[in-house]
Image: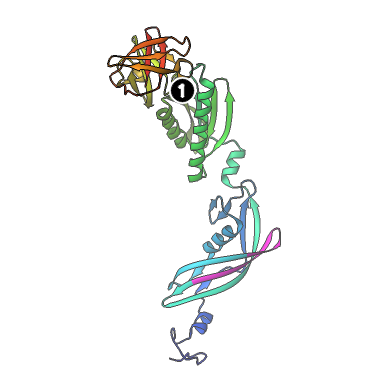
Amino acid sequence: MFCVECGKEGKTYDGLCSECYLRKRQLVRLPAIIDVTLCSKCYAARIGKHWVDSIDLVEAVRLSLEAALAQDKNVSDVELDVRLTEKDPRIYLATVTVSFRAGELQAQKVFEIPVRLKKDTCQRCGKKSGHYYEAIVQLRGSGGFSDAERLAGARRYFLQRMSRLSSENRDTFISKEEAIHGGFDFYVSSSSAAKSLAREMGKMFGARVKSTHSIAGRKDGRELTRMTYLVRLPEYDAGDILEMDGRYYLLRRFEGNNLYLVDLSNWHETTATVGRLTGIQVLHRKTHVFSASVISESDNEIRVRDPETNECIGIQRPDGYRGGQTAIGIVKTKKGLFLVP
């Protein structure tokens, strides 16, 4: 076969060799110049109508060119390779290699396109600057001695989860955080995200969650409401000893309103519901549970050395106790010593 344009012998496409075919047919087209807009605060890039985070300038230019690319209906498998040359801080020259397939023809076309950098403020940063929020999450302690440590852990968890949510949806963010007496207030841009995370923390930390709303104004004839979610941590934590109805329990874990316990008198597992607990006393693990050396074991009794008095004390052997231990946790209560699994 011969090219009808240049006479070259070989495979033809609509009567043309590959060089003439690509020269005469504008299979892929890019603009003569392109503007790339970056947020002046967070350096996100505006691609089309959307802002994109965590990309470098080359990727921002590539995505902008990709969005502006026009192609013939027969073109497929398009890929862009971009090389940038800085002319001045706001002007770059992009050398763009467009690889594509047109029917059976695999081809490339090279463009040189000036790139102008522009600055703007993205919607998220604009909202942050204006302290925009739809909901407040109030994280509070119980007033107990271990509040500071537990509040710090819950705050750390909240911030980590919010960071994850923000990476998935850039319109979700904390516009302000306030440390107040008894806890923290987080002003959250998304009411749905605040609600979801408050419930999640209730399950994670065994906290009680309450919600209220207030009128924030009117828009288009409708009332705008702001939600407040109170997340109150309980006075106990996993590993603490709870005294309930004259019995002592190790709190293994909690999920929402359910407590998973071990009865220290026999090491049998049981559960309880937060809403039905009244008059409980908490013996915090850090201050009430000690490690004691095991002196001897029998079928009915475990003898340990009291770490405070150095006395040898016998304790009834629980059903679930496994022998052969050299040390074990003990707790001193009004009813004597108990082994702690």
Asked if residue 291 lies left or right of residue 259, the reply is right
Asked if residue 276 lies left or right of residue 161, the reply is left
Q: Quadrant of the C terminus?
A: top left
Q: Residue furthest front?
A: 296
Q: Nearer the viewer, residue 283 or 48?
A: 283
Task: Give the quarter of the image for residue 82.
Answer: bottom right
Q: Secondary structure at mark 1?
A: loop
- Residue type for callout 1: Leu
Q: Quadrant of the N terminus?
A: bottom left
Q: Residue at x 52, y 63 (%)?
A: 66
Residue 222 image point, x, y percent: 47, 35
Q: Is residue 325 magenta?
A: no
The dominant secondary structure in magenta is strand
Within 10 Å of disc 1 (Cα), the crowding (few <14, some 14-19, many 20+) is: many
Label 1 belongs to which residue?
A: 233
* 237 w.r.t. 134: above or below: above
Q: Nearer the viewer, residue 249 or 259?
A: 249
Q: Which residues are magenta?
A: 84-99
Residue 124 image point, x, y percent: 56, 43
Residue 264 image point, x, y percent: 34, 16
Task: Give the quarter of the image for residue 209.
Answer: top left
Q: Nearer the viewer, residue 251 or 42?
A: 251
